[in-house]
Amino acid sequence: MAEWINTLLQGVLLGGLYALFAAGLSLSFGVMRMINIAHGDMIVFAGYAAIFTAEHLGLPPALTLLLVAPALAVLGYLAQRLVFNRTLGDDVLRPLLLTFGLSIVIQNALQEMFSADVRGLDIGPLATANFQLGGEVAIGVLPLLVMATAVATLAALQWLFRQTRAGRAFRATSDDAGTAQLMGVNRQHVYALAMAIASAVVAVAGVFLVMRTTISPSDGPARLLYSFEAVIIGGLGSLWGTLLGGTILGVAQAVGAKLNPGWGVLSGHLAFLLVLMFRPQGLMPKTRDR
Amino acid sequence: MKRLLETRSLTAGYGDFQALYGIDFHVDDGEAVAIIGANGAGKTTFLRTLAGQLRATGGQLRFADENIAAWPGHRMAEAGIALVPEGRRLFPSLSVEENLLMGAYTRRPGPWTLASVFELFPVLCEFRRRPATELSGGQQQMVAMGRALMSNPRLLLCDEISLGLAPLVVREIYRTLSQIRGKGLSVVLVEQDIGQAMKAADRVVCFQEGRVSLEGAPGTLSREQISQAYFGV
Amino acid sequence: MKRELPLSAAATVTRASPLSIAAAVVALLLVLAAASMPAWAERSQLRMATEFLCLLTIAQMWNLLAGYGGLLSVGQQAFVGLGAYSLVVFGLQGGLNAFVVVPIAGVVGLVGAALLAPLAFRLRGAHFAVGTWVMAEVLRIVIANLPFVSGGSGVSVAPTVRGMDIATRDAVSLWLALVLGAGSMAAVYALLRSRWGLALVAVRDSERASQSLGIEGRRLKWLVYVAAAGGCAMAGALIFATKLRVSPDSAFSLEWTTTAFFIVVIGGIGSLEGPLLGAVLYFALREWLSDLGSTYMIVLGSLTVAVMLSGGGGVWGLVNRRGWFDLFPTRRRVRGASAGDD
């Protein structure tokens, strides 16, 4: 019994990581209506960047974030402003094809730089520390930390969108970029800014990823799939929906893996397909259909 | 009378399709100019070009003594040009209040604030938290105008603000417009309702197939003249 | 002021041009030349030609979906895999000859797509892309866990070609591949020249138009999706009939889609000539850069990014910007009195 409770708890907390993965995707889709196929690879890239700065600059793991997040934000801003913005328009296919190509480039570039060995970030005792909750039930400190970060991040994003001038501009641009321009909103800049914020969130996700587990250059696509599944299960346009979606995905994977080691990821996929079949708009949808 | 806006031989279009063939037009400080013309004559295209949504393909465009033809679209609001677009185009995801606040994005100083807009349109204050697109047509038109005012413009461009509204509502809107003008705003009105246009404007300009076909003060133009200029018969 | 529209006295609508007729003749000659390869070519050349034609088939199917149907699928590997496993089920277990299984694989692909379509078509655009990907992954994992088809680490399908000597095997592979490659191009060409083809392009170019077309538009997309699946499945069965070993990871590998993506995008999406050109470029680059490992993929990926930034038409798009070189003309031209500008 305790085993099942543990599994559930692990699943929920895994959901926190998935929500972090998905938050960046949710943001960029919400503002630019663009799904970045290289999203998962950017998470992996951030992870490698964290490992690199930890090893070569001797920074403690938590501090790598202070370097990686701003760096990735700048990269994201430039990528959106100089490259992605050129493909946005009526043709939905162009940004997808471009980011698909980019995904391949990133994966293979990482392969060239770090070879195919798995790497991880050494965080010492934090990796296995846990809180005992009585009986044989325990939750890991790190997973709990990740979940807390996910909740905090989503709350911050929600506040940004609802209460700030920039957030209003994001929503207005997402609704009607042409009219937003009438009000003085520079669409190029707004998109780039949204990508910068999304990239910063991706950086956080990447750093936590390599704290929790080891990575290899080709791990990107799977992370994209989980992010996407979390967003769809939770419902488009809802940040809290993304948290819910991530949690459901995490639980599905954890339960599946418990039943049979080979079924973990499959259970997640099946949960996604089930939602698609019976409630395609997701569990907490916000956006209208365009 | 200072010249606020001036165009000379302005041309504009959509890709291969040319919509404006050399427009000479001007607005002086404090003036209200009405643009009339049949559908497809280029009136909306002209306003959109003035507001920066469309890039002029030729000719001159000067605002407050500056050449703005080559400016990026989003700078027009900063300069003091505001457009109330055809069809209102409110932001569906935003509430009434948030739509109005979007108007103030450039933070231009001036008399128009959330409070003064609510004073002008009291009914909006009641519905401030509602999604803007839930309001009636007339109320949405008020939001659209309020939103344009919030940028404290020097030149207000209004594209068919009477479209789809009951006559009573239209009269109310135009009454508010003259109140707004009282604060020193210059206005360009595109109107299908010729009667309303003539009443509200100091000067009337008629477009026909992308060109100016007639211009003059409302009192001086005869019915035949207008008919001819409008339809080209 | 008003422009008079000229009365077109003798305007006709034509499609062919001298160039396209010449191209048709050349194409026929090439096909015949390819068919004769078993008589004069070396084994390695035969195998490369077979691989070329199979990849061309998959690419044309992917192009049909994305370039003409507006459906970006990142899950075509599902059907390649189904084709490969048809080989296991009907060939290895059912005792049929590998080449006989190829058309059966096509049917399996059609059925599979028909079953997946209701789910897939709940999604659009980017979501369709990732959704089809997830479905392919599900298939991969499910089959990997099915001992019934010897999932897991894979199985050899050599027994399906028992009784055929190597020369015959290579020849039949090539001819089948030729049927698939040339056939897929001919089928797509025929589709585009038909009334359906016109509707398809209209639907692709405007989502709103597609909505107004309603049921017609959706049925069209369904048809395209299912047909493309059949083509991919047959190509998959044939490919693995030459590889002689089927494993879930290789059968359902994302690389099938990635390769099709490279071929179509670099060559020129949304045209028939593009994927053909792209396949040639792909093979040339592969030979040329084969020693460079990951760098080769970086080059390909960067090329697709460059193509997308430069208008999206690929190499063929650059060459044929005005449509002068349409080898497979699908555009209708008006010829006759004062046709104005085109």
Image (cartoon, coloured by chain):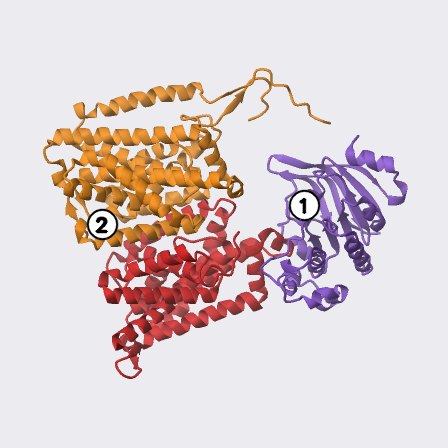
Chain colours: A red, B purple, C orange
Q: Hey, which quadrant is residue A17 in on the image? A: bottom left
Residue topped by disc 1: B49
Indicate which disc residue C248 carries: 2
Residue drawn at point x = 73 percent, y = 65 percent:
B123
Quadrant of the image containing the C terminus of chain C = top right
Amino acid type of the residue tagged 1 in the rendering: Thr
Residue pictured at 33% horizontal, 32% vertical: C184
Q: Residue A50 placed where, x, y %?
A: 34, 66
**Is B36 located above or below residue A35 in the figure?**
above
Q: Is residue A230 left or right of residue B197?
A: left
What amino acid does circle 2 point to? Answer: Pro
Q: Residue furthest top?
A: C10
Residue A77 seen in the current view: no
Name the residue at the bottom extreme.
A134
Residue C136 x, y percent position in the rendering? 31, 50
Q: Is residue A200 above or below residue B174?
A: below
State the residue in front, C191 or C49.
C191
